Image: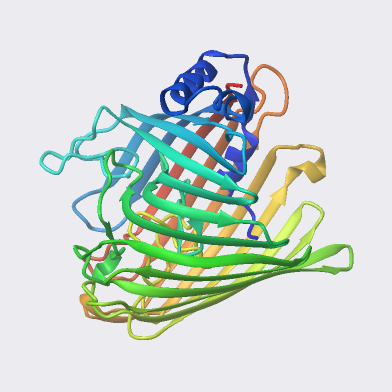
């Protein structure tokens, strides 16, 4: 499977532990309110755990074109409480998860809002002082199969809940994941609403439409998907998924990931493909796209060098759900998605893990992405180009009183020759993130 993005890797590493019984008592009270007798005691409480994540985020978009808005710049603080129960005893176990999310404005103004860190008023462009939501999820477990209903998260190729803003986007619906067959993970789900990362309420899902690619106002009643990941052996894995975004589009996803020892290092191969077409009444307009990509890397010690190519063909851009990211070759770029119609994209990446030099917790990345042959039909433009250069540096403190506090700095320089009115603008973008996750019990 693909490695965690650097922000995700910092999040995964930044966990500490404190002695705190109050959240555990809260979980017990929740259990008593919904479960009879002593069912809650064994497993439900004993196997429960809770975390509190603090995210301090600064995002600055310094626009370099002639547009009226010269910058989008905001600073905010997030508090994310995760309470996860265990399961009641028996062949079918019941559980309950509760997530509380809150974002607080530290700095913003009407002329600088719009970074998607905070909700913004449509009338006066002012960012909210704070926003929050409570998200419960019921769950059932049978053997190695888990069913969830309520507020759910999706980290799948066609809809990836990106960690690139203050709070994560979540979905309302049901998911089922099974690992009963050795090496195979099967996933299916039915989703009817999305809660975007700068919102407090569930909304109908729409198609992402930068550069006016599709009808952005068209909504879908649901997303339904089925597919799985198969670990053939320790060096080879396959992914196959089919998703239907009702009356907007359908998408089939195929991927192959492989590791091959070469000399003292490892050659990595990452092949991905997305085949998209309109669905039902096609409310978003015509969808006709084939997106193929290949990323090859060589890892030696702390070094990793990767080269990739992505080719988009068909009459339209590559579709994806607004508010999510598509796990193509260009995921987690900062200023553009590089998914325009006819676009051909090259990229080069250099990663270094300083643990190889005796500095564990410190990682860096340099990335250059260039797209050409771009067609922007709604803007009457063709054969256009775009490019982005990224620099990233992340560090997780390894010891002392600040152990497990994570820091992330990201910088991008983005330029294109798109006509006025394009969604992606020439900009220099800077992001700073401080992250700390406390294990409550």
Q: Residue 313 appears in which quarter of the rendering?
A: bottom left
Identify the residue at image location x=35%, y=47%: 61
Examine the rendering and report whether any part of residue 198 can be seen: yes
Residue 354 x %, y %: 74, 43
Q: In which quarter of the image is the N terminus?
A: bottom right
In-front residue for pair 320/368: 320
Q: Is residue 421 toward the left or the right of residue 318 in the image?
A: left
Furthest-front residue in this view: 37
Residue 145 x %, y %: 59, 52
| Vertical side of 349 occupied by 122: above or below | above
| Vertical side of 431 occupied by 48: above or below | above
Furthest-right residue in this view: 263
| Vertical side of 55 occupied by 1: above or below | below
Residue 241 x %, y %: 51, 70
Identify the residue at image location x=51%, y=59%: 156
Q: Residue 87 appears in which quarter of the rendering?
A: top right
In-front residue for pair 89/352: 89
Residue 288 x %, y %: 35, 82
Examine the rendering and report whether any part of residue 152 can be seen: no
Identify the residue at image location x=40%, y=61%: 336
């Amino acid at each position: 499977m693909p490695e965690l993005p650097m922000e995700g890797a910092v999040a995964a590493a930044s966990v500490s532990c404190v002695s705190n019984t109050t959240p555990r008592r809260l979980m017990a009270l929740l259990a008593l309110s919904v479960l009879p007798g002593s069912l809650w005691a064994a497993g439900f409480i004993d196997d429960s755990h809770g975390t509190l994540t603090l995210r301090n985020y600064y995002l600055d978009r310094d626009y370099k074109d002639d547009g009226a808005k010269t910058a989008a710049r905001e600073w905010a603080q997030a508090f994310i409480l995760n309470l996860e129960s265990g399961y009641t005893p028996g062949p079918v176990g019941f559980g309950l998860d509760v997530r509380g999310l809150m974002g607080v404005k530290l700095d913003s103004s009407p002329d600088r809002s719009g970074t998607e860190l905070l909700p913004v008023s449509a009338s006066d462009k002012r960012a909210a002082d704070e926003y929050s939501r409570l998200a419960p999820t019921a769950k059932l477990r049978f053997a190695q199969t888990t069913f969830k209903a309520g507020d759910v998260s999706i980290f799948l190729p066609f809809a990836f809940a990106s960690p690139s803003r203050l709070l994560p986007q979540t979905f309302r619906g049901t998911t089922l994941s099974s690992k009963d067959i050795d090496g195979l993970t099967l996933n299916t789900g039915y989703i009817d609403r999305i809660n975007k990362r700068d919102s407090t309420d569930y909304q109908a899902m729409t198609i992402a439409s930068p550069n006016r690619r599709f009808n952005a106002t068209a909504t879908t009643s649901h997303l339904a998907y089925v597919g799985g990941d198969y670990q053939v052996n320790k060096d080879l894995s396959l992914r196959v998924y089919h998703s239907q975004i009702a009356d907007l589009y359908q998408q089939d996803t195929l991927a192959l990931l492989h590791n091959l020892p070469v000399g003292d290092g490892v050659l990595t191969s990452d092949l991905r493909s997305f085949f998209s077409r309109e669905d039902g009444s096609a409310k978003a307009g015509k969808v006709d796209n084939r997106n193929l990509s290949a990323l090859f890397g060589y890892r030696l010690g702390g070094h990793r060098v990767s080269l990739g190519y992505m080719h988009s063909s068909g009459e339209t851009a590559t579709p994806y759900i607004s508010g999510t990211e598509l796990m193509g070759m260009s995921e987690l770029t900062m200023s553009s998605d590089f998914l325009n119609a006819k676009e051909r994209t090259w990229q080069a990446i250099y990663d270094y893990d300083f643990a190889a030099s005796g500095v564990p917790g410190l990682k860096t990345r340099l990335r250059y992405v260039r797209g050409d042959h771009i067609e922007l039909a709604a803007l009457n433009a063709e054969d256009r180009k775009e490019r982005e250069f990224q620099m990233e540096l992340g560090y997780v403190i390894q010891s002392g009183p600040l152990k497990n506090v994570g820091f992330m700095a990201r910088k991008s320089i983005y330029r294109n020759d798109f006509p006025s009115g394009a969604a992606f603008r020439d900009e220099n973008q800077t992001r700073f993130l401080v992250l700390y996750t406390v294990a409550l019990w």
